[in-house]
Image: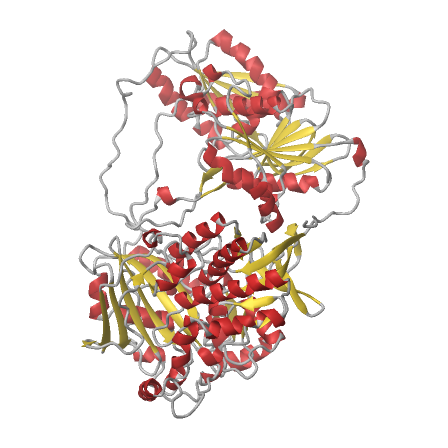
Amino acid sequence: MSTADTVNTDVLIIGGGPSGLATAIHLADLLKSAGLERRILLIEKGASVGSHILSGAVIKTDVFKSLLPDVDFAEIPFNAKVTKDAMMMLSENGKIHVPFHPPYMSNKGNYTASLGQICRYLAKKAEEKGVEIYPGFAVSEILYDNGKVIGAKTINTGVDHHGNQLENFQAGNRIEAKLTIFAEGTRGSLAKKLIQKFDLAKGKNEQIYSLGVKELWSVPEGNIAPGEVYHTMGYPLRDEFGGGFVYGLNDNKVAIGLVVGLDYEDPTFDTHNAFQVWKTHPFIANILKGGKLVEYGAKTLPEGGWYSLPKLYVDNALIVGDSAGFLAMPALKGIHLAIASGMQAAKTASIAFSKNDFTENTLKQYDEFIKDSLIYKDMYPTRNVRQGFAKGMVAGVLNFGTDLVTGGAGFAGKLKTEADKDTTKKLSEYKKTLFHERYKNKLEPDKVLTFDKATDVYFSGVNHDEQQVAHVKVNNPQSFKTVNIEEYGAPCQYFCSSEVYEIHTDKNGNKELRIHAENCMHCKTCDIKSPGDGITWSVPNGGNGPDWQNM
Amino acid sequence: MVREGKPDFNLTLMSLTIINLIKQVPLPSEMRMGEDGLMDRTKAKSIINIDCQFALEAGLQLKKQYPDARMIACSMGPTSFEPSLRKAISLGYDEVYLLSDRKLGGSDTYATGMSIACMLQHLGFTKDSKEPFIVIAGRQTSDGDTAHVPSQVAEYLGIPQATFVESIKADGKGNIIAKRIIEGGYQMMKLPMPCAISIAPTGISPRKPSLIGAIKARNSSLTVFSADDVKVDTTKVGINGSPTIVANVVNMVSERPPVMLSAGHSETALVDSLIANIKGGGNVMGEKASTAEKVTEAPADFPVTDIRNGAKGIITWAELANGKITRPSLELLTPARKLADELGNDTKIMTVLIGKNVKSLATQLFEHGSDEVIVVEDDRLEEYLVLPRLYRTFDRRLCQQKTKSSCPAYSSLPSSDLR
């Protein structure tokens, strides 16, 4: 029984994305077959399931048949089956259709989808199986007892900008669980703390990320057919790793985006603006002609691959999905892996419940299950691929080639990664053309095809309560001035997908940072890429953030 | 729950029921875009009306003084209102009731107030109740905007009321001290319970629900009443029974995007850009043909009922602020005059002027178009108060019978009495 401010549950799942929902669904099924009745509570910080979910997406759908074996596949709200799948190499005015697919990048048999829709459907299935899902609640703190995870606590609400309690103050509730599953998605804020506390990344590669910026458009009939899938390389990127995507959806919609590796060196690189420039390329501009922007969003993706996975378990806790880094290079597919990891975690949890042992002794089986699953098959052979691209496209392609031949081992053994915040060069060190110089004629938004960040942010439905402490924090205000602003030119004002960070110059030329936390897309780029002592992203009030409908 | 120190009275003597009247409305600033880039009303989210959210919070603040208070939230509307009542539970309310009946559809505020009052009476809350209770409601809804219902519920129940209140506190002696917003300041009022309060969205912001509250909300049951359950006179409700007829509702549609007239980061830049824009004609909109058609005739099948009973004339009310007649009360005489002329038949305008030493102001009313001014003077009428006004209004109804006025007209302002 729960006491006044504590909720007791058997399993607490933090996050209502594909990994958390897959864990919930599969665990509910396994417990039922084992004849065990256990409480599964899933907490989601978005106002509703799906409101914080963003992906391209083109999904490898087989894993859904294992997750939902009794469901008619046609009932799952995938969008269009991929009919055409092409790689385009773009130059400023031209394009080359690459006549073959790089390995792992073929999408034959896959489906386009709105991951938000899929998650809403999965949530419905989970609730049918008795899982309790509570959207609109954010957990800000892991609870420990004797150094072991015992659950999490929801954020205190009703405080002012300085953290002082207001009249409508509500202390957060404690959720105590026998087993806590961390399914917060990319750069999970509590997962990050868990990894730090238990040194779970020891001996592992640094996790590295890309930032994906996406718009959903409604276009005139005929501009693109449902299931037409394009990936682009080249323009507007130069040294940066990444590329664009164009996915034709049903109902004359198209999902477009640009995904850029955050290991770039230019401190003024602006992914959102690069995305706007990319849209001006005739190939994309023609597809969008006569269309209207419907939604905007942005999110990072963990790309370090197999060697960047931390240790995935501690007593009473497991990490699933993007929070662990289950994403397969080079196609950047993580949804089927998120679901697979959720299912393996559920298998582990089910065993833990039958043995009533939630210590590492039992939970270590999660590792073995992962190794035996499709996750290993997808991620292990490409374990060195991403690292090769850190040295540029040519080196990356060569490295990729050798990986293919050697089953992933390459000739240099395990390649290391460098944290994204450390690869940024200082303004004085960066010798190449700065971002805004590269595209100087193309950066003025026309509000028909291209948009400024503020306009895009409007189309995300973002909303944050006024009465709360800003949820992004500069870790060291002194060094921020001397290092981030002076030496690096405050990259946060450029890399942020949503114009949260503004540098204001007063009459005397003094620069100061102004934070507009209410714009935040929860993409986590600032937590990843800010040089020096960095910025920490933590959860705002539950229900705050973007309100994506079909992203 | 945060307690503000020990209350200064003996709680065991008093149990209190806090009853909150709420309404669910479409999200006013709906950000949901349809595919064509326009607001998609079908996808409009529903929320608890903003004023009602402040009222719910006011009730929860009052609970700090009465920790064992019975917390009730209720509403009248379709069963789609259920999520809002459950949200009320997640905020801290214990029991929820919904009055829902097809027969009530289309009710005006008079019928609504009466129906809700019947529900409260059915739940055992009357002006003769031995245990104290307070009815708290939001000032007005974003989809109705009348601000009538809280007052009508109070009147039907026969209990004192205070409207446009920012905050309330119990005095420990069975009274509620209400801080009421008026023109240019506040009025502190003391009302004995049971009483009704309508809350303006200016006080303590609504709290966020707790997880425990949300779990409780999911597991709670909602009691739904029908019109017959609460013994509402169904001839007086619904579209047919309501005295008011809503003839037309017009959506304000913006025909052009906002125009930037002045921009800059310093005063000079702002002024320079403003001058440049005006010189460039930025403040002149092109002539546009009027697209609205004037509706002068009711449609052929519109049910016409003449309830005037031979009465004629228009009554307006002159509101006073700081000893002067307020501008809206004077402006009101213009449409009154127009209406009188349209009605023809030698329709006269009578204006009621209530207060202390106000007779001299009557001249101003004549100048602006009144034909007759009814002055009610008394030293005790210096301060604006609802109850004495009400009695004056009853006296006015006697006047009405004498003069057979058919049409009272009131200007609507935050501090004005709306009935």
Could you tell whether A505 is left or right of A451 in the image?
right
Image coordinates for residue B119, horizontal then vertical, percent: 57, 24
- Judge by depth and name the residue closer to the eye, A208 or B299: A208
Could you tell whether B265 is left or right of A156 in the image?
left
The residue under the point 47% across, 25% down is: B101
The quadrant where residue A331 appears: bottom left
B338 shown above or below A350: above
Image coordinates for residue A3, horizontal then vertical, percent: 70, 50
A411 shown above or below A1: below
Could you tell whether A424 is left or right of A59 in the image?
right
Q: Is residue B201 visible?
A: no
Image coordinates for residue B345, horizontal then vertical, percent: 35, 10
The residue under the point 28% across, 54% down is: B281
The residue under the point 57% across, 13% down is: B395
- Judge by depth and name the residue closer to the eye, B91 or B164: B91
Farthest-out residue, front: A34
Could you tell me how many numbered marks the image carries? Answer: 0
The quadrant where residue B18 appears: top right
A68 shown above or below A438: above
The colour style of the image is secondary structure
